[in-house]
Amino acid sequence: MSLHVHEEVLAAANRIAVQRGDWTFTPYEVVRALPGLKENSVRTDIVSRCCVNAPKNHLRKWDYFRRVGHGQYEVLPKYRTTGLSTGSHAGGPSVARTNSRRENPDHPSLRDVIHAVIHTDQDVCTAECLEVAVVTQGNTLDEVVRNLSDALALHLEGEDLAALGLSDRPRLQVIFEAPLSL
């Protein structure tokens, strides 16, 4: 049986969270644990499609994770597993374990994109990064993008980018969310 990306992401997050003992993980750890999957698909599932406190910008969502801090996510109790073999989640569907994928420590996968969602509320544009704890606003779309770029540069200044799972020259990808006038 072939698993969907979100199921493989959940299984890998559970394996990592069990090893840590506190039910938390980072997107970088899951990407490294699933080298056979597209990095962007894995990250999108973690920070957006499978995260209960992410902006609602996907038609299909799963309530597997909660963002608990700077690049840190928690497996929600309903989906936690403790076994090392195939198991089911308390109250949730069974997800098979995948051990056919091997981690390659010589070539860790560093992301080069930081995602942010911008939405408008009356006369203010607000931007929130999905992978790092940066939020800012501006009066116009151009202003909020400039402010976001500046805030990210300040936030990442002096940080070990590789430790955060970032390449040495990350880029910003912005999603603009606006209500439709129907």
Image (tube, helix red, strand yellow):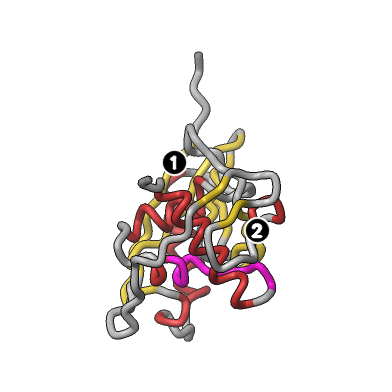
Give the x, y percent position of residue 134. 56, 63
- The three-letter code of the residue at mark 2 reads Arg
Q: Disc 1 or disc 2, which is closer to the eye? A: 2
Task: Give the residue number, with chain letter if any, for mark 1.
Answer: 176
Residue at 62% across, 68% down: 24
Q: Decide: is 2 above or below 157.
A: above
Residue 137 at x, y percent in the picture: 56, 52
Residue positioned 71% across, 55% down in the render: 77
Q: Which quarter of the figure has residue 22?
A: bottom right
Pinpoint residue 169: horizontal percent, then vertical percent. 31, 74
Is residue 15 in sight in this rendering? yes
According to the image, label 2 marks what residue?
Answer: 80
Judge by depth and name the residue closer to the eye, 33 or 90. Answer: 90
Q: Which residues are magenta?
A: 22-30
Task: Report the side of 76 relative to 115 (left or right).
Answer: right
Residue sitting at x 56%, y 43%: 62
Left or right: 169 with respect to 131? Answer: left
Residue 23, magenta (yes or no): yes
Q: Can residue 179 be found in the magenta stretch?
A: no
**Nearer the observer, 51 or 70:** 51
Amino acid type of disc 1?
Phe
Question: Under tag 1, what secondary structure?
Answer: strand
